[in-house]
Amino acid sequence: MSDVPDFALGLAALGRPAYINLGREHALPDHRDVDAMRAQCHAVLDAAYAAGVRRVDAARSYGRAEEFLAQWLATRGHQDVQVSSKWGYAYVADWRRDVATHEVKEHSVEQFTRQWRETEELLGAHVGLYNVHSLTSDSPLFGDLDLLLALGGLRDSGVRLGFSTSGPHQGETVRRALELTVEGRRLFDSVQSTWNVLETSVGPALAFAKESGAEVFVKEGVANGRLAVDPPPAVRELADQHGVGPDAVALAAVRAQPWADVVLSGAASPEQLHANLKAREVDLEPDELAACAEPPEQYWATRASLPWE
């Protein structure tokens, strides 16, 4: 494969003490205070940089992920790291693992204005792409002229805009969002969606996005750890054939998609990252694991039932 997607490191599992990735609990320190999680985050960032990964993805709701990333960039001095972040969710767990609600979603101009200011204060010019976090087709964003104009202003300042998607109707959201214009120009030129061998329904919409000139990021390529911890037999068989873990096969399947530009790893430790990156050694056909797909509603219901640990 000559033209393959980049890897990026996503910080969802590294900026707060609890997240829904299966298999994460054994990758992290037993005592997850702020200092321990900062050290873990920096160790994974160091491992990613050493492995040639030059993209990092964060969000305001990933606890202290932006703070940890800013500190890492300042101390390491790297000038070639491309940073993306997201606004739209607020982290409300106060560094606790036993709360019922860890993050709260709000797509409003007030939330955008506040969170962009917070992101800019921490990461400044490092941020080249700012995403709406978990956009859905019923988001108030689509009808909020003040918010759209504010987003257009950030776009016009030189920051690229994108959006992430979730839920069983991702395809509809992708197509609708890419039609949005502000002052005669398309608002978004990047999309970050969940696609993996269990949830493939957004694939045609991501092909459309790619054809339209948008950059396509793929998140949750190992299905929040499901494909690493309990993979379908076909994934396990290919992993055995290639001498890699099932996580690498799952991410290789993402890399095989002709519309994918960037594949996110949500690794929680250097060891998980190195295992993920073995996907670089596995070449698959785009539809090689198509039989593993679940109905979207079933997939998202299962995801919603995963515990925060």
Image (tube, rainbow, N blue to C red):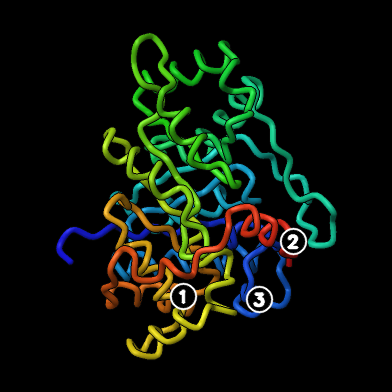
Coordinates of residue 185 in the picture (x, y in percent) = 34, 16
Mark 2 or 1: in front is 2
- Residue 29 — which label? 3
Q: CA distance from mark 1 to mark 3?
A: 21 Å
Find residue 288 and report its image quarter: bottom left
CA neighbours of label 2 inside 10 A, class few (<14), some (14 to 19), many (20+): few
Q: Secondary structure at mark 1?
A: helix
Mark 1 or 3: in front is 1
Q: Secondary structure at mark 3?
A: loop
Looking at the image, tell me whether mark 3 or mark 2 is earlier in sequence order. Answer: 3
Q: Among all residues in the image, which is located at the extreme left? A: 2
Q: Nearer the viewer, residue 169 or 180?
A: 169
Horizontal side, residue 250 vs residue 146: left or right: left
Instruction: Return the residue at label 1.
Output: 247
Taking the spot 38% from the left edge, 67% from the top edge, the residue there is 48
Q: Nearer the viewer, residue 199 or 187?
A: 199
